[in-house]
């Protein structure tokens, strides 16, 4: 095997320049499809994916000719990443083409699905059903939207998913991974990763149990006790969100102390004629205030920031794109003028900022330190943006009152976004890992999904389950093949990051009121971590930013401590639910 340093360097240099060209082409062709769903554009994308796979297979073959033991740590890390080619390891082109086609067809079903409402209207998820789930308080209307969406999305792809699992597992086993779940977890490069996330979830469950109890009591007042099963579960369609994953749209009903200025800035944004562009300029302004890298001109020229009105079908689920040429970075978001989309814009721009900070790294290091890091960047900024102080400073709330009651109201609004999410963020890949392992077989897909939803989220299906349903397919990341534990990791570490940046900004008050806006030191500290990309093991990146090497739920618990005390007082013994699904689904 090759040990000559000159040959090692020239291989890496060649790979780097070729990979940029190949990945650029694949990004462009994919972008064309995601922003204009047609059979023709899908075929171009699938063809390009096969070309890109051939490039990766050849790079893999060439890389295995080198002797990794004589290399520098950095070069060895590059070679390992060059050889981590995922499903492109499938050299049987027919099988790889079929896997990619099935994956793309599931994502297309999801992205073009429409529900025929009792009124006869045919509604897509974005923006119509999302808006309905957030604003309707009519039990039957919510049920119609919820049932319709499951039927038109997941209900149309159950057999496809079983094939996707089989072909995806076969491909990654060629690289030596036990199954697709093992491959996805390998990106965290932590042998105890599964145990670590379970420990974090167990540590945080009391917070969620208290919030769940509080929400359940309020929702019973709205919909009537008879709509709730005796097991303590909340019917899945009543939480203001199609997947009950975040409950922010219930803020007005769940605000503990009425009579204070609303914390939902949606109405004010609409009143001020906010546009999608202005939402993204607001986010860009925050990064600039930290001395971080502004969005480049190509971002503003080439992003798709609103759902096209020209009849084109697009994949509306928001995403941020790196075109791997160091210059072209875009967001695709069907932005609507709501507080939630202001937050999403910061989330997506956090990805772009990460791309910008590590753009001069070798291609194989242009990734998050681990996938959770990439999901955390924008959210950390958004923790500052959402403070009453910052919302006041950008004119979206009239006054800042930090008396105890207003403080609890604010913490409740943040808990509906961050605490409500934790079991959902945790259970998606619990389900998928069990599917990839073969523990959950196709006839058990739906039942096991609801077992986890009932056990961890304390919500249940408002209708009896049938084995032809495939409710996992009603959530984007399942048909799109996007791993999900990254969001659970992000929701924990973003509070570690927030605490570290607030310390760096010399902020002294309670963590939940910290706004790092304009802090150049905080911006420098964050930038230095982001610049690393995936060039170092993630504990080193974590240490650089937070002075510790582990994921730690303490900052999140400290942030919400005053609210937990309030909730325990409010709930008394009225909290918790039966771990298995109710038989009386109301
Ligand atoms: C939390 C996750 N965010 C994302 O996809 O960007 C979601 O929307 O389900
Ligand atoms: Zn993201």
Image: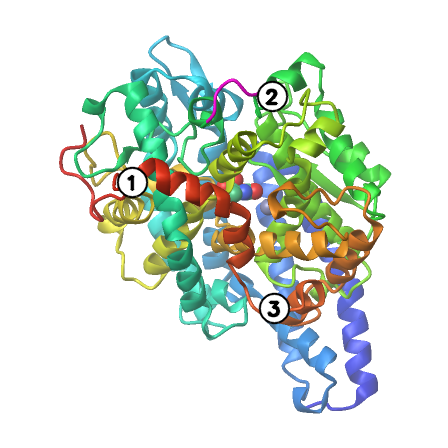
With respect to residue 149, does 499 lie above or below? Answer: below
Query: What residue span does the magenta drawing correspond to?
Result: 257-261
Read off the residue under disc 3: 57
What separation in Å lies between label 2 and label 1 (alpha carbons)? 33 Å
Q: Position of residue 392 (x, y in %)?
A: 71, 27
Q: Compare residues 105 and 197 and report the one nearer the observer.
A: 197
Q: Nearer the viewer, residue 21 or 188?
A: 188
Please give the residue where the numbered disc 2 appears in the rendered image.
266
Query: Residue 197 placed where, x, y %?
Result: 44, 62
Q: Nearer the viewer, residue 422 or 302?
A: 422
Q: Earlier in the sequence, mark 3 or mark 1?
A: 3
Between disc 2 and disc 1, whose residue precedes? 2
Point out residue 73 in the picture as x, y percentages from the top left corner: 71, 82
Asked whether the beta carbons under mark 2 and mark 3 sit within 8 Å of each other, the answer is no
Q: Nearer the viewer, mark 3 or mark 1?
A: 1
Determine whether, in the image, residue 64 is placed left or right of residue 586: right
Whether residue 304 is visible to the viewer of this picture, yes or no, is no
Task: Tell me, for residue 364, which label it has, or none.
Answer: none
* Location of the C terminus (image quadrant): top left
Return the mark for residue 572. Answer: 1
């Amino acid at each position: 095997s090759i040990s000559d340093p000159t040959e090692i360097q020239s291989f890496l240099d060649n790979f780097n320049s070729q990979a940029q060209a190949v990945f650029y082409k694949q990004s462009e062709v994919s972008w064309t499809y995601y922003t204009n769903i047609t059979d023709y554009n899908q075929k171009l994308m699938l063809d390009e994916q096969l070309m890109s796979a051939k490039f990766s297979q050849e790079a893999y073959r060439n890389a295995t000719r080198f002797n990794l033991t004589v290399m520098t740590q950095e070069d060895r890390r590059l070679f390992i990443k060059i050889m981590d080619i995922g499903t492109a390891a499938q050299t049987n082109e027919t099988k790889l083409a079929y896997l990619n086609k099935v994956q793309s067809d599931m994502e297309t079903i999801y992205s073009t699905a429409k529900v025929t409402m009792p009124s006869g209207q045919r509604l897509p998820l974005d923006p119509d059903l999302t808006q309905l789930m957030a604003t309707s308080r009519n039990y039957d209307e919510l049920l119609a939207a919820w049932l319709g969406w499951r039927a038109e999305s997941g209900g149309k792809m159950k057999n496809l998913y079983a094939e996707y699992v089989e072909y995806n597992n076969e491909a990654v086993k060629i690289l030596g991974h036990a199954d697709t779940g093992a491959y996805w977890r390998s990106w965290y490069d932590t042998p105890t990763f599964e145990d670590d996330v379970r420990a974090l979830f167990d540590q945080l469950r009391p917070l969620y149990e208290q919030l769940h109890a509080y929400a359940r009591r309020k929702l019973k007042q709205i919909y009537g006790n008879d709509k709730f099963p005796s097991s303590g579960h909340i019917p899945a369609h009543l939480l203001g969100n199609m997947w009950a994953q975040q409950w922010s749209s219930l803020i007005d009903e769940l605000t503990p102390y009425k009579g204070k200025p609303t914390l939902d800035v949606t109405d004010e944004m609409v009143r001020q004629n906010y546009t999608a562009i202005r939402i993204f300029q607001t986010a860009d302004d925050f990064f600039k205030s930290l001395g971080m890298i502004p969005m480049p001109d190509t971002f503003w020229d080439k992003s798709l920031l609103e759902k096209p009105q020209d009849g084109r079908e697009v994949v509306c689920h928001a995403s941020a794109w790196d075109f791997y040429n160091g210059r072209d970075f875009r967001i695709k978001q069907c932005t609507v003028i709501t507080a939630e989309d202001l937050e999403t814009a910061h989330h997506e721009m956090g990805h772009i900022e990460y791309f910008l900070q590590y753009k001069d790294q070798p291609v194989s290091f242009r990734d998050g330190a681990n996938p959770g890091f990439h999901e955390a960047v924008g959210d950390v900024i958004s923790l500052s943006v959402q403070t009453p102080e910052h919302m006041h400073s950008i004119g979206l709330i009239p006054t800042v009152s930090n008396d105890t009651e207003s403080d609890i109201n604010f913490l409740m609004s943040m808990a509906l976004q961050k605490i409500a999410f934790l079991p959902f963020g945790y259970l998606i890949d619990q389900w998928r890992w069990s599917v990839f392992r073969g523990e959950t077989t196709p006839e058990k897909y739906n039942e096991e999904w609801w077992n986890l939803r009932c056990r961890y989220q304390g919500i249940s299906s408002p209708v009896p389950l049938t084995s032809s349903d495939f409710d996992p397919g009603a959530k984007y990341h399942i048909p799109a093949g996007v791993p999900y534990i990254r969001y659970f990791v992000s929701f924990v570490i973003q509070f570690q990051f927030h605490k570290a940046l607030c310390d760096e900004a010399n902020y002294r008050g309670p963590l939940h009121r910290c706004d790092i806006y304009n802090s150049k030191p905080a911006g420098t500290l964050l930038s230095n971590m982001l610049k690393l990309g995936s060039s170092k093991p993630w504990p080193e990146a974590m240490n650089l930013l937070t002075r510790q090497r582990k994921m730690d739920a303490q900052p999140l618990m400290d942030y919400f401590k005053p609210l937990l005390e309030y909730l325990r007082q409010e709930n008394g013994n009225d909290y918790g639910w039966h771990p298995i699904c109710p038989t009386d689904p109301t």
